Amino acid sequence: MINLLFIAALIIILFFPPAKALLIRGGMHIGLFQPEVTEQKVPDGPVAEDIILEVQDGKAFHLSDLKGKIVFMNFWATWCPPCIAEMPSINSLRKEFKGKVVFIMVDIDNDLGKSVEFMRDRNYDLQVYRTTSSVKGNLASKVIPSSFIINQHGQIVFHHKGAADYSNTKLTTFLNKLLLSN
């Protein structure tokens, strides 16, 4: 009987994305899935490739238009359990740095209607974008979720592949240092 319950739980976790996301989120609460933040006095990294982003109303802009601002960019999808699991921590991070850091949530499926509904249903205060140009170079990743922090000079100073708990104090300290270096 215990084996059957174990197999049933395993099947649910494998084939029901919200259950898998809940399991990953539980791992985040016990300290797993922490983003690796390097301690640098003056972050330096490759310049982010320029891409064109569009919001639901059709307004488009270039990523390079945000030079002079700190950008947190996350590539994600509504069907991705690790993406779903990390979303509450990204939303908390946005609340903490609202008006100081630009948050760009890039829907890799390019279905903004579905993504906007996802954010609204969960009461997340995160703007969803899609790319209208190809993503190549140092922003291209075969892993989702993938998150980047781009400094005021357009340099990638943080990159994390896979789910992460972005309410991590090391990351908030890192962002605060970037803000002070402006």
Image: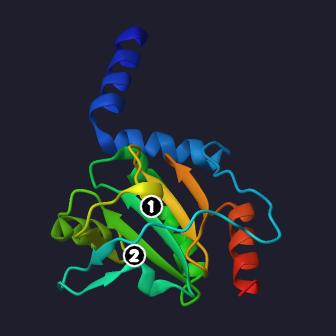
In this rendering, the answer to whether 107 lies above or below 18 is below
Q: Position of residue 103 (x, y in %)?
A: 47, 76
User: Does the rendering let one see residue 89?
Assistant: no
What residue is shown at x 33% (from left), y 60% (from top)?
135
In this rendering, the answer to whether 22 lies above or below 44 is above
Q: Position of residue 118 (x, y in %)?
A: 27, 65
Camera-side residue of 119 and 160: 160
At mark 2, the secondary structure is loop
Cα–Cα gap, marks 2 and 1: 9 Å
Q: Is residue 30 left or right of residue 113?
A: right
Q: Quadrant of residue 2?
A: top left
User: Does the rendering let one see residue 168?
Assistant: yes
Instruction: Work out whether mark 2 precedes mark 1 in sequence or the reverse, and give the earlier one.
Output: 1
The quadrant in which the C terminus is found is bottom right
The quadrant in which the N terminus is found is top left
Which disc is residue 136 wearing? Answer: none
Q: Is residue 124 left or right of residue 175?
A: left
Determine whether label 2 and label 1 are within 8 Å by CB. yes
Camera-side residue of 176 and 30: 176
Which disc is residue 126 wearing? Answer: 2
Q: Residues within 10 Å of mark 2 (few under 14, many from 20)?
A: some
Q: Is residue 65 left or right of residue 132?
A: right
Which disc is residue 87 wearing? Answer: 1
Q: Amino acid at mark 2?
A: Leu
